[in-house]
Amino acid sequence: MSRLTVFKDKSRLSPRYVPKTLPHREDQIGFLFNMFNDVLKDPSRVYLRPVQVVGGVGTGKTCTTIRFADNFQRKARERKINIRHVYANLKLQGSSRTILYRYILDNAAPEIRTGSLSGDEMLYQLVKYLKNRNMYLIISLDEIEYFMRHTKEHLLYEFTRINELTPERPCGVVGLIVISRGTDYYSLLDKSELSTLGRSYVNFEPYTAKQIGDILLARSEEAFKRGVLPYEVIEFVSDVTAPPPLNGDMRYALDMLLYAGNLADNLGSDTIKLDYIRRVHGELYHEITSEDILDLPYNEKIVLLAVARALRIKRSAYVSFEDIRSACDLASEELEVKFDKLDYALQDLDDRGLVDVRSLVQIGISDIPIEELIRYLDNLMDRVRSGLNED
Ligand SMILES: Nc1ncnc2c1ncn2[C@@H]1O[C@H](COP(=O)(O)OP(=O)(O)OP(=O)(O)O)[C@@H](O)[C@H]1O
Ligand SMILES: [Mg+2]
């Protein structure tokens, strides 16, 4: 008799879930603990300390930073030190500096009304708040490259100035963790920002096939029922994920398991077969992940769906702005939602690397063959649609 589902807990494969232990990232977590070791002794003497977390796609930068900060806060609490971590994904909370500050204050100092405050005033209030409550803060800024490309605001410079707000003593913000895929965005920073960033640097090497296998094994024990996932399937996924073009992108490996599990359920199978992985791998295009889609503002989700549909209708590599506008009108009618600012949303999708805007008449998704593109778009549209439902 077939089981209803191969999953024990599907959410354990979601990109937002951060497992308690992260195999093969013990060194990076240890490095971060060392960096902030003195905060656990006497935080009142610690000046803002920047540290950069750098590594390729899906190397575990985000989950490692979040895991470190949770563990660190727990340690601090045991020592009666009041530390809070605010994690900001700039793709979600960073459409401008003011929006980011408001987000940080809402999370660190919810009693402060930010409505009418300017950016500078918010920082000042934050520092005062921390001091009055004997509280300390670590701020993580994820996806800094996107922020720099998208806003071109000199955010990091402002963070140097936090220390100057209280020159006679440390400001209470003890850590600034800046997460990026590489260092190309340095060219968008000015000298003082580069020096704010400092020299502390944790590198995330791509996972090897063996490491991917260990991680998948641990994650699949949480997500799948016993006996559902043969080890040879894990080995196959690891071997596909480690080399280029995927370069050890753990998110893609987990996506493959998730989609193959869904396929098993749809087909009424009680195990995940190698063949399912092959099929799913053929349909999932690695440059747009489910997390990319989850991170999109609502408007951008609709526009991405519209671009995909317009490309499908035209059956060509590029469509025009007007084609997309018509597809957007149709999509918003059908989904009974409003959308606006099409040009802003398209530019944003371009900044995120999801859509390629060459000119008003040449807008595409990538240079892959049309048949492959259409197969991919069908799949993408389902994912965008389920992304819309999650809002
Ligand atoms: N060592 C690990 N153990 C368990 N899961 C992991 C590990 N490393 C990464 N993952 C999982 O892989 C996925 C991708 O990791 P993460 O989001 O941290 O990558 P990233 O380096 O931030 O990638 P990007 O540059 O695309 O933001 C997440 O679902 C994460 O939980
Ligand atoms: Mg990340």
Image (cartoon, grey):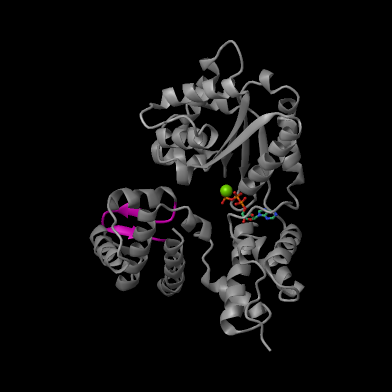
**Span colored in magenta:** 353-366
Residue 159 % position (x, y): 52, 26
Nearer-the-camera pick, 331 or 149: 331
Residue 204 % position (x, y): 67, 45
Quadrant occupied by the C terminus: bottom left
Image side of residue 374 versus residue 360, left or right: right
> From where the camera sits, is residue 165 visible?
yes
Farthest residue toward the bottom? 1
Image side of residue 391 versus residue 328, left or right: right
Identify the residue at image location x=63%, y=77%.
5
Nearer-the-camera pick, 260 or 235: 260
Q: Is residue 345 magenta?
A: no
Image side of residue 192 versus residue 240, left or right: left
Quadrant occupied by the N terminus: bottom right
Farthest residue toward the top? 168
How many numbered circles does the render carry? 0
Farthest residue toward the front? 111
Q: Is residue 358 magenta?
A: yes
Kindly indicate the quadrant of the structure image that contains residue 308: bottom left
Residue 99 % position (x, y): 41, 37
Nearer-the-camera pick, 361 or 135: 135
Check the image and report above or below for 267 versus 22: below
Check the image and report above or below for 142 versus 341: above
Check the image and report above or below for 233 versus 54: below
> From where the camera sits, is residue 356 visible?
no
